[in-house]
Image (tube, grey):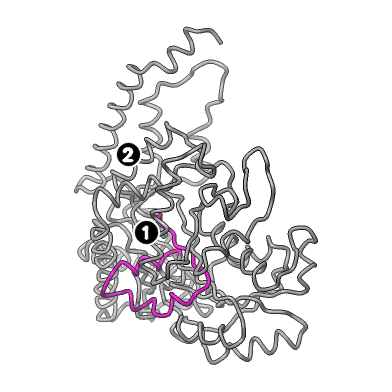
Amino acid sequence: MNDNELKKAFDPEAFRADAHAVVDMLADYLERSAGADRRRVLPAFSPDEMARRWDAPISAEASEELLPLLTRVIEDSHHLHSPHYVGHQVSAPLPVSAVADFVGSLLNNASAVYDMGPVNVIHERRIVEWMCGLLGYGPDAGGILTSGGTLGNLTALLAARQVMTEADVWSGGAAAGGELAVMVSEQCHYSVRRAVGVMGLGTDNVIEVPTGPDFKIDTATLAGCLKTAEERGKRVFAVAANACSTATGTYDDLAAIADFCEAHGLWLHVDGAHGASAALSPRYRALLAGVHRADSIVWDAHKMLLVPALITAVIFRNGSDSYRSFAQQASYLFEKASEDEWYNYAHRTMECTKTMMGLKLYVPLMVHGSGFFARYVETMYDLAHDFAARIRSSADFELAVEPEANIVCFRFASSGAEDPSALQKKIRTRVLDSEDFYLVQTDLGGDTYLRCTLINPLTTIEHLEELLELIRAVASEVVASA
């Protein structure tokens, strides 16, 4: 590589021109996404078709120009900023958060070690302190940020195993703790089961606790599940509760589960990846009643705090427990015992090289204020209640459960359909083929329902009424063609 090639690649003026052009392009994209001339929400290409659209080989020499290439990327992407995006629990990021992410990507400070990312280490500390206060934890609480809820749940359960069993699993392996088990809601996120498998405990040691018709843990069955597990030689060390569940957005009774855990000497972990943001709202924080008694909780900012993925807080009621997940010496990184180096987060996270993820949340919190996010949460939760009311009042729709968060599960009801579940799947396929809306589906009690997550702050009840009309139209086509 010669000097001219390097100078061209790192030329500040070329960067200035490219960055200005890209910002203009993204600003136009935002305007289009929210406007009447918005484009398809999700391009209706199959994976094979998309692969053919991007079949150009990667060559040794430059083969694309930046702006045309990024134009194609935007065109073929999933458009979360469209108010017709009502699918998965992924936010439409605030522009200011995307700008912060842009800055962090260029600075590239690997912030799991203070010397490698000093300012972001402090941002992370301030974010965790803020979240601890919202959750009602005391001054001894603490935690870290990590890359997503899956890693977050794993990190919390690793700490729980170490604290509750005192087994030297790190040196002796998973068998050192005996046949350990975790009790979970049958509506738990798959990442909790995956964490138990990754820990080497075996997914057979995931003890599912039944849920009631509201899809919340049936707390009356907890004692029986624990007794059955113990009779089978299993040692339960933790209970994982939902706040809220991914499928239905319902909150488990955290206070009652905390009572049970305290009575039986068990760790209470709360998967609050989606629903912990209710803590910001004076009107909705009662959904989290009892959360301050949880030993650990995960909270995804990239779900209900309008930031790009990934940024997940793993918070412990006893902050020193956050040092129990991983125990390892690395003299080239660390000088002191782990708890003496709170500023070296690699002691407590899976990552050693960690992005400046805290910047994506810290900047919008400082620029917009936390009240902005509280109002956003309330707006989305209120919208879900309004949408549920429209569904309930429509003779051709059925509501699966009254929403507590911003997730609504429902289905089209047709007397002409022999298989209601098959009908919902065909409806969703037709809706996606239209490219006008994006929604998902979920199975509840053996039946398939359509599922909306109302997460884009620009989505209104009028947009959702348009969705119901589209569903009616495609359902009519499906039934007529059967």
How far across and down, in percent of the image, does residue 307 sit?
36, 50
Gap in angstroms between the C-alphas marked 2 and 1: 33 Å
Image point (63%, 91%), residue name: 224
Left or right, 105 with reference to 218 = left
- The residue that mark 2 highlights is 99
Image point (54%, 92%), residue name: 220
Q: Quadrant of residue 453?
A: bottom left
Q: Quadrant of the N terminus?
A: top right
Pointer 2 local density, CA inside 10 Å: few below 14, some 14–19, many at least 20: some
Please state which amino acid type lies under the numbered disc 1.
Answer: Val
How far across and down, in percent of the image, does residue 480 sit?
38, 69
Reply above or below: 59 against 37: above
Pointer 1 local density, CA inside 10 Å: few below 14, some 14–19, many at least 20: many
Left or right, 25 with reference to 203 = left
Q: Which mark is residue 431?
A: 1
* In the foreground, 92 or 431: 92
How far across and down, in percent of the image, does residue 16 sit?
31, 22
Left or right, 324 with reference to 423 = right
Magenta residues? 273-302
Please state which amino acid type lies under the numbered disc 2.
Answer: Val
Instruction: Examine the structure image and report whether residue 245 is included in the region drawn in magenta.
Output: no
Left or right, 439 with reference to 227 = left
* In the foreground, 46 or 10: 10
Q: Quadrant of the C terminus?
A: bottom left
Q: Quadrant of residue 384?
A: bottom left
